[in-house]
Every structure is written in C-alpha cells, then in structure tokens.
Image: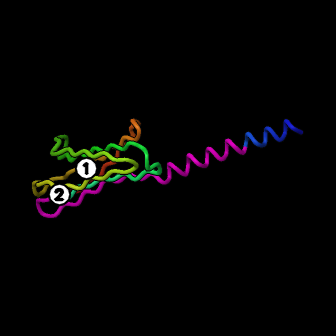
Amino acid sequence: MKRVNCCLLAALLIMSLSISAYADMRLARSMPRLTISGTTAYCSGEYRGADNKADVALTLILKQGTTIIETWTATGKGSANISETERVALGKTYTLTLAVTVDGQKLSEQSVTATS
C-alpha cells in the first residue's frame, strides 16, 4: 500500500511540474512589428515573460534584402521593448527580425516583412 501511494505521489508531482512549465511557456510572448508609411519605417519589438526576475535581452534588426539597415538593443528584468523609426527607400521590401535571450538562453527569432 505504501508503495502504491509513493508511486501516485511521484506521478502527481511530475504532472504538476509539467503543467507549471507549460503555463510559463504559454505566458511568455515575443513579437516584432514593422509598419511603413512613406519613407519612414516604424519598428518595434517586445518580450513579456512569465518570470519578472529573468534577465531579458532583445536585438531588433532591420534589413533590406541581406543588407542590415539598423540594429537596436534593449535589456530588462522579465520584459523589454524597443520602439524606433528609420528612414527607408520607396518601393523596397524590408524585414524586421527580433532576437530574444532570456537568462542566457536564445529563443527562436521572429521576423516580419513590409514593403514601402
């Protein structure tokens, strides 16, 4: 009987840890935004994590083709954001990429594209 109770307790503990980790992943959000109006690109990126004590570092990269136009960085605890503008040429396609590092661990990069 004690062995069965021990196994059930261990299974419940494992399940609760898995659910907690899944909830933390769902609460963390990162998103780049790129809007172009005329010759001005409005570039922003943010990360909001579930752990407000985590070290967060953002890098936001604006490219035209393979050419890097501008790079911005920001840091914070639990969250960080960047909001910048940049002059762009008419009739070109631009890509904005957001790279996020949380407590030294790189997350997958996200990109958006817009045409002037």
Element at badge 2? strand
- Compared with residue 114, is residue 75 higher up or lower down, i.e. above or below? above
Quadrant of the image containing the C terminus: bottom left
- Image location (x, y in percent) of residue 30: 38, 51
Which residue appears at 17% of the width and 45% of the height? 70
Element at badge 1? strand
- Image location (x, y in percent) of residue 22: 56, 48
- Image location (x, y in percent) of residue 103: 41, 38
Q: What's drawn in magenta, residue-wise?
A: 12-40
Mark 1 / mark 2, whichever is N-terminal: 2
- Compared with residue 66, is residue 44 higher up or lower down, i.e. above or below? below
> So how many labels did they put on this image?
2
Which residue appears at 33% of the width and 53% of the height? 46
User: How far separated are the C-alphas under marks 1 and 2?
Assistant: 10 Å
Quadrant of the image containing the N terminus: top right
Q: Are marks 1 and 2 in contact (CB under 8 Å)?
A: yes
- Compared with residue 71, is residue 82 higher up or lower down, i.e. above or below? below
Residue situated in front as seen by the camera: 99 or 12: 12
Q: Residue furthest bottom?
A: 37
Residue beneath label 1, please? 96
Q: Would residue 57 be found to the left or right of residue 22 on screen?
A: left
- Amino acid type indicated by mark 2: Ala
- Image location (x, y in percent) of residue 64: 17, 47
Residue beneath label 2, please? 41
- Amino acid type indicated by mark 1: Leu
Which residue appears at 17% of the width and 56% of the height? 85
**Is residue 38 inside the magenta stretch?**
yes
